[in-house]
Image (spheres, rainbow, N blue to C red):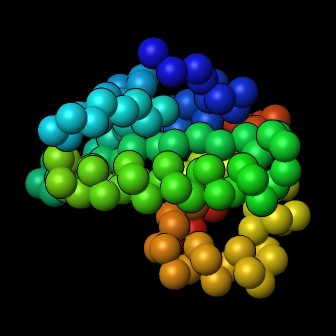
Amino acid sequence: MPAKDIYHNAVKNALVKDGWTITADPYFLKYEDAELYADLAAEKPIAAERQGHKIVVEIKSFVGRSLMYDFHSALGQYIVYRNLIELTAPEYTLYLAIDDAVYKDFFQRKSIQVITQENQLLLMLVDMKKEKILQWIK
């Protein structure tokens, strides 16, 4: 089992507070010879007559060697997970959960914005102290 990110419980609690049901912790992703673990899977029912939303969430704290190093790692992992989820469970949408302060301080850089847009990175901004989802960015 992979180690949990330091913000794992805060993101999990934020999802539950927002009406999501955690369906996997961690989410096991298997394709051919690849066996990987994303942090969480969750579902949010909309209405009885329509199918609910299903998401997989990868959580990153960005507290490593440098923000850029952590971004390289998170982006690569996100792309691999997204591609394999599209093959194995296309009903799920992958989000990268990050602290709102990291978003303000790092993800607002022009270079980072270009890369996130080019790679269609979906973000979930969380106030980790309040365990609250602040914004979904597509």
Specify the quadrant of the image occupied by residue 28: top left
Find residue 57 and report its horizontal and vertical position in percent.
47, 43
**At 87% from the left edge and 64% from the top edge, which residue is drawn?**
105
**At 60% from the left edge and 51% from the top edge, which residue is drawn?**
74
Q: Is residue 110 above or below residue 74?
A: below
Find residue 32 and report its horizontal and vertical position in percent.
15, 38
**At 43% from the left edge and 36% from the top edge, which residue is drawn?**
38
**At 59% from the left edge and 41% from the top edge, which residue is drawn?**
59
Q: Is residue 100 visible?
A: no
Q: Quadrant of the N terminus?
A: top left
70 left or right of 87 in image? right
Specify the quadrant of the image occupied by residue 83: bottom left
- Pick the residue in front: 20 or 37: 37
Find residue 133 and report its horizontal and vertical position in percent.
64, 49
- Pick the residue in front: 13 or 118: 118
Q: Is residue 104 visible?
A: yes
Q: Is residue 87 above or below residue 30?
A: below
Q: Is residue 107 above or below residue 5?
A: below
